[in-house]
Image (spheres, rainbow, N blue to C red):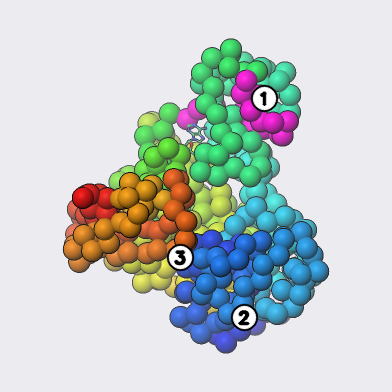
């Protein structure tokens, strides 16, 4: 029997309390849901706009169970939640996506092995458990190559580029005794992502492909539609659908892809949630990625994901506050009426910390990029 949808008026539980949870909570509240959030921190971006903020360690399973008893479904905005935490929730309520999706995607090695074994294209990789493994892998894959920690990596954290064999011992030491993965370096022309949703009964919807430009390994600007040929965009969407189906995702999942210089797609990473690159959907699509997550985890019909006009999003890192000498010049940025400002309610700006973003929607993608970049520059100009 098909489970009944979780209707507005119900309470949704979120594990993790950052900006992704905040924007999910805003979308959920708009639709009449209540929000409870669980994380080890207090006064968080999500907690500030939730009905209940529980501050407790993820490993405190009694608190986790008490939290789960108060909600109709649990989702997460942060995939590095321990497996035991999602398992404890799953004893009491549906967890979407489920613990198995979390388990696979929180470890790069498991994720790549899952993808490769299901025939999805990935760069060549090897498991690294010792210096001998790394030496052998460097011979097999050639250099340069990228060494990553298998767990807890994001935004390039725990990642080293190796160009010579002399660097191998130091690079191995950098893993700090944890499991690693060596990846052949991809000669890519562009990085893109597909944010897609899947329901319990297998309905699927993908947002248009996002083109992503990084700076110091952190997403800097996203634009959509990606400037790739339509057949490649179609292939990216087909790949995403295959991956969500193979994992049995109920909810959202983001597929990060490389477009190689010879025009092939390789999957870099999966995130079982909304994604920084999808923020422009808040201003450019009838349904945002956050509303889509609400719909998918609640068993409601999925919303319209069409991109109304070309759009670009620029991240605002703590650097903007520091470079502006305290308060960014908000008025100057908003002089352009096409600019929309999103801030995440974080008190302390630090270099590299995601504090907010700007979006511009325009007639052409180039104009959207120009408007959003100029607005961000105006934030720090005297
Ligand atoms: P990740 O944390 O895996 O998303 O990696 C962060 C960034 O490092 C990516 O967005 C790429 O720009 C770069 N990168 C990661 N893996 C590779 C690879 N195998 N080849 C080339 N660049 C990579």
Residue 59 x/y as whole percent: 76, 59
Q: Residue at x 51, y 84 (%)?
A: 32
What residue sits right under mark 1 in the picture? 173
Magenta highlight on residue 152: no
Residue 160 x/y as whole percent: 55, 29
What residue sits right under mark 2 in the picture? 11
Q: Is residue 283 in view?
A: yes
From the viewer's perspective, is residue 166 above or below residue 255? above
Task: Give the crowd class for mark 2: few <14, some 14-19, many >=20 residues within 10 Å.
Answer: many
Whether the residues at callouts 3 and 1 have beta carbons within 8 Å, the answer is: no
Task: Give the crowd class for mark 3: few <14, some 14-19, many >=20 residues within 10 Å.
Answer: some
Task: Give the crowd class for mark 1: few <14, some 14-19, many >=20 residues within 10 Å.
Answer: few
What residue sits right under mark 3 in the picture? 345
Q: Nearer the viewer, residue 325 or 44?
A: 325
Q: What is the distance, in whole Å, between disc 1 and disc 2 at their CAs? A: 46 Å
Q: Nearer the viewer, residue 301 or 164?
A: 164
From the viewer's perspective, is residue 109 above or below residue 16? above
Within the image, what quadrant is residue 55 found in?
bottom right
State which region is magenta.
170-186
- Of the numbered discs 3 and 1, the one sitting upstream in the chain is 1
Q: Residue at x 66, y 71 (%)?
A: 54
Q: Which mark is in front, 2 or 3?
A: 3
Within the image, what quadrant is residue 246 found in?
bottom right
- Please identify the quadrant where the N terminus is shown: bottom right
- Secondary element under disc 3, as helix, strand or loop, is loop
Q: Residue at x 32, y 64 (%)?
A: 341
Q: Nearer the viewer, residue 92 or 342?
A: 342
- Of the numbered discs 1 and 2, the one sitting upstream in the chain is 2
- 28 displayed left or right of 109: left
């Amino acid at each position: 029997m098909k489970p009944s949808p979780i209707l507005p008026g119900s309470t949704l539980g979120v594990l993790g309390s950052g900006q992704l949870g905040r924007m999910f909570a805003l979308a959920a509240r708009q639709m009449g849901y209540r929000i409870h959030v669980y994380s080890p921190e207090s006064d968080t971006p999500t907690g500030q706009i939730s009905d209940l903020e529980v501050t407790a360690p993820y490993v405190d399973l009694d608190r986790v169970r008490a939290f789960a008893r108060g909600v109709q479904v649990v989702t997460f905005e942060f995939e590095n939640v321990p497996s035991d935490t999602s398992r404890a929730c799953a004893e009491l309520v549906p967890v979407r996506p489920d613990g198995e999706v979390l388990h696979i995607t929180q470890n790069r090695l498991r994720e790549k092995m899952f993808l490769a074994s299901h025939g999805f294209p990935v760069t060549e990789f090897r498991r690294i458990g010792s210096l001998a493994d790394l030496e052998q892998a460097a011979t097999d894959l050639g250099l340069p190559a990228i060494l990553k920690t298998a767990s807890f990596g994001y935004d390039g954290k725990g990642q080293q580029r190796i160009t010579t064999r002399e660097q191998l011992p130091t690079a191995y030491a950098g893993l700090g005794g944890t499991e690693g993965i060596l990846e052949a370096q991809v000669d890519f022309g562009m990085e893109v992502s597909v944010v897609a949703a899947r329901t319990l009964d297998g309905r699927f919807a993908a947002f248009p492909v996002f083109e992503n430009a990084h700076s110091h390994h952190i997403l800097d600007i996203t634009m959509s539609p990606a400037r790739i040929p339509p057949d490649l965009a179609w292939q990216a969407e087909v790949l995403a659908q295959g991956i969500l189906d193979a994992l049995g995702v109920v909810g959202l999942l983001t597929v990060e892809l490389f477009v190689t210089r010879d025009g092939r797609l390789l999957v870099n990473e999966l995130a079982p949630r909304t994604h920084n690159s999808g923020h422009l959907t808040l201003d450019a699509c009838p349904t945002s990625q956050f509303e889509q997550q609400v719909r998918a985890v609640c068993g409601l019909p999925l919303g319209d994901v069409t991109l109304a006009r070309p759009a670009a999003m620029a991240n605002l890192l703590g650097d903007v506050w520091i470079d502006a000498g305290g308060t960014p010049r908000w008025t100057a940025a908003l002089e352009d009426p096409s600019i929309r400002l999103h801030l995440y309610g974080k008190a302390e700006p630090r270099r590299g910390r995601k504090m907010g973003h700007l979006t511009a929607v325009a007639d052409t993608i180039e104009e959207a990029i120009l408007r959003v970049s100029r607005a961000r520059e105006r934030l720090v100009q005297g």
